Image (tube, rainbow, N blue to C red):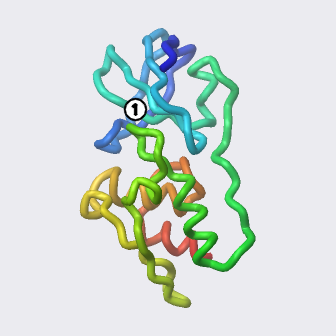
Amino acid sequence: MERTELTRDVEAIQIPGGHTVTLEKGWDVVITQSLGGTYTVQVPAYGGLFRIGGKDADALGLEPTTAPAVAASGDLEERVWTTLKTCFDPEIPVNIVDLGLVYDMRITVGSGVEPADDLAGGEGAAGDGVTGRAGAGGGGPAAPASSATRAAAG
């Protein structure tokens, strides 16, 4: 864990609520994880954990990053599994597949991909948001699960 001071105001996503908040310049934060092109920080002044996108890493005094590219090779199912493995739990450094949160999927031609998961019943940031980020290529902003699974299938 690395302690740093924010160099500018930055938008962050509250964990696990999924609300967007602005963390203020000068606040002390502790970087608890940096995986999937995003950073999880603990903010004592605000209380709790927050996700900062890689594009905003400069606010943490780091080089801006993007989510890792997902290989376009392989069949559709292999590409979906690869994409899902780029989405990490915000509190522990394990991707959602290896953690067992997504354990099966059904691919329907023309309709998309329907993952079988244990993501808080599909509600809140842990449901639609996690599946949405995976469909968007990893640590990107949350999207509804239905559009995310279609994006992964497209």
The three-letter amino acid code for the residue at tag 1 is Phe
Left or right: 108, with 70 as reference point:
left
The percent coordinates of residue 113 (x first, y second) are 48, 78
Q: Circle 1 — which element?
A: strand
Q: Which residue is mark 1?
A: 50
User: How many badges with numbers are in the image?
Assistant: 1
The percent coordinates of residue 110 (x first, y second) are 54, 89
Q: As drawn, which residue projects farthest toward the right?
A: 73
* Residue at image location 45% in from the left, 82% down from the top: 106
* Residue at image location 41% in from the left, 64% down from the top: 102
Left or right: 34, with 23 as reference point:
right
> Foreground residue, 94 or 88?
94
Left or right: 70, with 35 as reference point:
right
Near mark 1 (Cα within 10 A), the count class, few <14, some 14-19 or many ≥20, is many
> Foreground residue, 86 or 26?
86
* Residue at image location 48% in from the left, 23% down from the top: 31
The percent coordinates of residue 79 (x first, y second) are 63, 70
Look at the picture and state if 64 lies above or below 24: below
Occupied quadrant, residue 8: top right
Occupied quadrant, residue 61: top right
Look at the picture and state if 30 lies above or below 85: above
* Residue at image location 35% in from the left, 66% down from the top: 117
Look at the picture and state if 75 lies above or below 144: below
The C terminus: image quadrant: bottom right
